[in-house]
Amino acid sequence: MSGFSPEWLALREPADVRARDPGLLTALAAHLAARDEIEVVDLGCGTGSNIRSTAPVLGPVQAWTLVDYDPVLLEAARAELVAWADEAAENGESLKLKKDGRAISVRFRQADLMQNLETVIGGQPDLVTASALFDLCSTDFIRRTARAVAAEGAAFYTVLTYDGVQTWSPTHPADAEMTAAFNLHQQTDKGFGSAAGPAAPEALALAFRGQGYVVQEAPSPWRIDASEQTLINMLADGFAGAVAEIGRVPPDVVAHWLSTRRTVSVVGHTDTLALPPV
Ligand SMILES: C[S@@+](CC[C@H](N)C(=O)[O-])C[C@H]1O[C@@H](n2cnc3c(N)ncnc32)[C@H](O)[C@@H]1O
């Protein structure tokens, strides 16, 4: 339904884990440290990569709501979280997990964020979080998210927002025009209106500062080499496919770029932590 397969999300998860900025994660943990129980909403959760990376630094009792509009990904998230946990028990619609001494309950909610953002954020969570989501969203939706998060007084933490910078190795003469065309594709509508694409990190920072939040940002680039050749190949295929759809680079140039297989790729991302005013 969403165009993001469980297989693709599983393939990228190790690169995501390596790329996240540890400093912002530590700052988030410090901000929430005094709370006995933490309530978290994860927007566009996919198969649950974000909870698996974030929950291990948060407190001993956590209640997560994982939100996505794709029922296939929500089912995959449930199965992957059961496999990830030390203990897992079904509790009606939700899961009760034990992981490294933490008690983590997980609710799964199928909802289209464009229609239901304020409802899914409502209920005064301590934290609203997301991973690899906001470059898909419009600047208006980013502002709307900041307003909705601020209305609940929640902390906000989002990771792996694409920032428009890519390097490929070996280099190719068409790298720059390919990246420019790819970045145009990133701005097409992904269900939230014209996407902010590479402008999303800046839009997030502006939107949360506009709500009086204290915003910290840090780079979180993917660094992928030949040890993850399948991921590089899929990335290169997706990159070239998006460039071809935009139609600015001649098809023979795109084909030549793709035929010269890359062995190293760095894809720029930004992590953003926005804390409410005290
Ligand atoms: C790039 S994937 C990231 C998934 C996951 N957060 C991760 O880091 O692996 C984007 C996710 O956003 C979800 N998504 C996209 N548009 C959505 C919408 N309008 N409402 C709810 N979820 C949406 C997709 O189904 C997908 O799971």
Image (cartoon, rainbow, N blue to C red):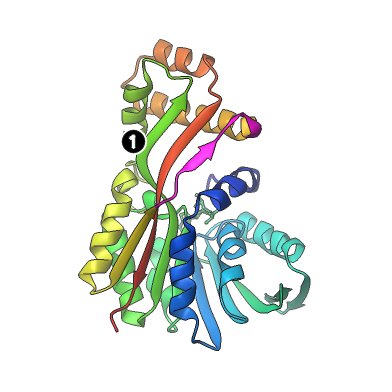
Q: Is residue 2 shown in magenta? A: no
Q: Say if 236 sits above or below 64 in the image.
A: above
Percent position (x, y) of residue 19? 51, 49
Q: Is residue 220 shown in magenta? A: yes
Q: Which residues are magenta?
A: 219-227
Q: Say if 28 sits above or below 230 in the image.
A: below
- Neighbours of disc 1 within 10 Å: few (<14), some (14-19), many (20+): many
Q: Please report the residue visible at 46 percent of the width from the left and 66 percent of the height from the top.
A: 129
Q: Is residue 112 visible?
A: no
Q: What amino acid does circle 1 point to?
A: Asn
Q: Say if 176 sits above or below 80 in the image.
A: above
Q: Secondary structure at mark 1?
A: helix
Percent position (x, y) of residue 187? 32, 42
259 with respect to 133 (left or right): right
Q: Say if 225 sits above or below 60 in the image.
A: above
Q: Quadrant of residue 113?
A: bottom left
Residue pointed to by mark 1? 183
Judge by depth and name the residue closer to the eye, 41 or 260: 260
Judge by depth and name the residue closer to the eye, 106 or 272: 272
62 with respect to 132 (left or right): right
Percent position (x, y) of residue 257? 46, 17
188 with respect to 128 (left or right): left
Q: Is residue 225 visible?
A: yes
Percent position (x, y) of residue 188? 34, 41
Disc 1 within 8 angstroms of ligand 1 (CB) = no
Q: Please report the residue visible at 34 percent of the width from the left and 45 percent of the height from the top.
A: 197
What is the total number of numbered labels drawn onto the structure image?
1
Q: Residue furthest left?
A: 210
Q: Please report the residue visible at 42 percent of the width from the left and 10 percent of the height from the top.
A: 252
Point out the image quarter for the C terminus: bottom left
